[in-house]
Amino acid sequence: MKTNTTDILIIGAGLTGLTLAYYLKQLNVSATIVEARSHIGGRISTTYNPNQAPVDLGATWLMDSHNELKHLLQKLELSVFKQHYGNTAIYEPNSSTPAQLVNLPESNAPSYRITHGTQTLIKTLSNTVESDQIITNCAISSIKKTEEFMYATSKTHSFKCKYIVSTLPPHLFNKTISIRPKLPDNITTICQNTHTWMHDSIKVGFTFTFPFWKTKGTSGTIYSSVGALQEFYDHSNAEQNKYALVGFMNKTFYNYTKAERQEFALKQLKAYYGSQVRQFLSYEELIWQDEVFTNAHDGTFIMQQQNNGHPLFQNPLLNNSLFIAGTETSPFAPGKMEGAIRSAQFIFKQIASLL
């Protein structure tokens, strides 16, 4: 096994890892990103089918308050467009009350989506670094600190570096990577009790040739406490010439097959819109519970957002050689794309000051 030498090893080619590598270009250092999957993006995943609307099955929305993400998008010359919710929503509160069309309050905090899908941000960031800086199919299993260097190993690679930045969800980092010398107990306790955003979510979407949900007397915004689909939204493209509905399915439908989940969703949509829903172009889904390089939870309940942004994540470890980063570690907007960007900025500033 050949040892690769780099100044900074970044574990995870998701939004935090790629953004950090983008910022590190300002410094006279070498950086290598290792990704356990065969593809980059982390919890950003967009499905593209010819002549259909892109379907975001991971991170999707940003807000006006997400200033650092908006600034990064501007620097990368990527545009956003306003999420269409409409003035009404289909609301199904319980099994004894039929679905009803309710008025939506006017929102002072609109949501936005990235033009051409969120994966556009990942692709653009990856194009700012050299192709040999990103190594896929490389799951780090151990980290060791010596007096002078840090070492990390996978089944296929060994790395020698000055600094290691993990952008994995803290729970996954703690469960899958052995570290010598052992990290303090308070760090490992916090990591194993930190909620991982999206870890048990099911995102699904349908593409269509016609946006029937935009006709009078109905809506593409759905909130249901009864059906398989819990939240569904218009997901048409920025140009409004390709159409889709995308949202979240109840996680209890995990044990069904893809075909069965599709059918449950169609039956629910048919109750709202009629048989025209069966004229869909494609059905897409992503079961985040099956993503072993995101989800390491063993079924133990961890409250949503628990320990996200915890103060212990803000301090480097192993004598300023190891950093725990990622959206869950951000004190602002944890679990969001904004949190991932802010985490990358924070780690960049720490490394820059050490150098």
Image (tube, rainbow, N blue to C red):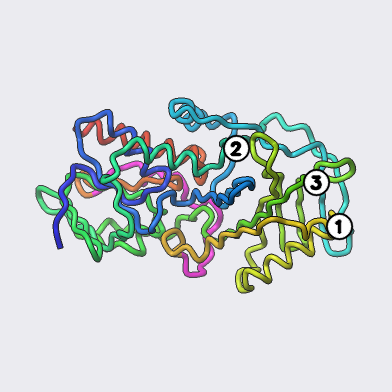
Name the amino acid type tagged 2.
Arg
- The local secondary structure at tag 1 comes to loop
Q: Nearer the viewer, residue 119 or 348?
A: 119
255 vs 134, left or right, is right
User: First in sequence: mark 2 or mark 3?
Assistant: 2
Name the residue that disc number 1 marks: 274
Q: Which residue is mark 2?
A: 113
Highlighted range, magenta: 297-317
Q: Residue at x 66, y 31 (%)?
A: 109
Q: Nearer the viewer, residue 259 or 151?
A: 259
* 213 inside magenta stretch: no
What is the distance, in whole Å, between disc 2 and disc 3 at their CAs? 19 Å
Amino acid type of the residue tagged 3 in the rendering: Trp
At 70% across and 38% down in the image, what residue appears? 241
Distance from the alpha carbon under mark 1 to that under mark 2: 28 Å
Give x and y (percent) for residue 232: 71, 51
The residue at which mark 3 appears reads as 213
**Viewer-side label of 2, 3:** 3
The relative height of residue 261 versus residue 2 in the rendered view (above or below) is below
Q: Is residue 236 visible?
A: yes
Which of the 4 image quadrants contains residue 314? Answer: top left
Does residue 24 sit above or below 165 in this rendering? above
Mark 2: secondary structure: strand
Residue that protrudes farthest toward the front in the picture: 50
Quadrant of res 72: top left
Neighbourhood count class around disc 2 (C-alpha, 10 Å): few under 14, some 14–19, many 20 upward: many
Q: Main secondary structure of the magenta part?
A: loop
Q: Position of residue 295 (x, y in %)?
A: 46, 62
Q: Looking at the picture, which amino acid does disc 1 mark?
A: Gly
